[in-house]
Amino acid sequence: MPYTHHSHSGSYCKHAHDTLDSVVNTAIKKNFKIFCLTEHVPRLDDAYIYPEEKELDMTPNSLMVQFNEYVKHARQLQEKVNNDSDINTKILVGFESEGGINNEHLDMCLKLRKDINAEVIVGSVHHVNGIDIDFDQETWNIGFNKYNGLQGLYKEYFTLVKNMINKLKPEIVAHFDLIRLFANIEIIDDETNKKTKISREQRLNINIENDWPEVWKLINESIDLIIEYDLAVELNSSAIRKGWDTPYPKDDIMKLMISKNVKFVLSDDSHGDDQVGLNYQFVMNYLIKLGVKDVFYYDIQDGKVVKKAVSLNELLNDPFWKINYPDYTF
């Protein structure tokens, strides 16, 4: 029964692996109910070409060609899978936005939504005004220094998140607090005398709500927009494979969202076969711990995209867990 609303493949994302066909077949074998295909939109300037794309001499034009090839391929797979009565999985086709580069990229996303008749948009902010905060520590540090530290960087990031939500109104708001991924610092552990990483928030003893009210206000305003536009926030399990003990978003923001009755969907942000549904058991434990009663998923019904609810109890009793995590109990 589980779902993912955010996925990539090596066919159309050069930092992913395995083909789009293979990733879809993996989702079918794992008994996913909904599998959303959401490759990245093109970037419109050479400055934003990723290193692995530069190695292949890719350009903004070739990224657009690749995206169009993805859409054609995805629609072919969707028609094949969704019309096969022996397959329990349903495919939705959309894309993941680039929300923090500039308004030109947001305008492109709005155009692409119409051009490809996207069922879902995964609304993401990977950049802070062109600085990639999702690539590596060194690049994240550029943003940290430009905005005079953590508070300034967080404030700018969540301003861009709010702007992205307001402009795109994406069905799925992705990795809401992605800015925290590289917000770490190395210290010497007093007991082991070895280097270890802790979050900068922990090092500064920061509680965002109490200590940085301007940042917390932006987070609140974004959540209010999510509710106003009836969007959903993804619980993105990729944070766990990247070293967190929770999915995005962390529990301080999650508790605020829960208090405001935000709707949550599941996402693995998979970049290959081995990441489809990866660490979902820990996401479920997170939901149980926080007292979430229902999760949501997008579906196609009578030719229209609809958002449906499923109780956590029903989800926990699905055969998916015994098939994919036979030794795990909740």
Image: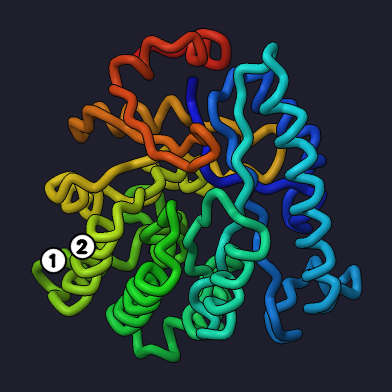
Near-viewer residue (74 or 202): 74
Which image quadrant is residue 200 in? Answer: bottom left
Task: Out of 312 and 325, give the one closest to the viewer.
Answer: 312
Q: Which mark is residue 303?
A: none
Picture coordinates of residue 41, whole percent (x, y)? 66, 65
Q: Return the x and y of residue 225 as percentages of the image width and height.
A: 26, 64
Circle nearer the viewer, 1 or 2? 2
Q: Amino acid at mark 2?
A: Asp
| Residue 227 appearing in the image | yes
| Distance from Cα at disc 1 to Cα at disc 2 | 16 Å
Residue bearing mark 2: 224
Instruction: List x then y, in percent, for residue 205.
Output: 19, 65
Q: Which residue is rendered at x = 48% and y = 14% of the image?
A: 321
| Residue at the outermost front position | 302
| Label 2 secondary element | helix
Horizontally, is 240 left or right of 261 in the view?
right
325 is higher (above) or lower (below) than 69: above
Type of residue at label 1?
Glu
| Label 1 vs 2, first from the N-terminus | 1
Image marks 1 and 2: residues in contact by CB distance under 8 Å: no
Residue at the image point whose x is 70% and y is 24% from the top: 83
41 left or right of 304 in image: right
Q: Nearer the viewer, residue 19 or 36?
A: 36
The residue labelled by disc 1 is 209
Pick the residue in front: 263 or 214: 263
> Residue 85: image x %, image y %?
68, 14
Neighbor class of circle 1 (other Cα within 10 Å; few <14, some 14-19, many 20+) is some
Q: Residue at x 67, y 58 (%)?
A: 116
Residue 36 sits above or below residue 257 on the image: above
Q: How many marks?
A: 2
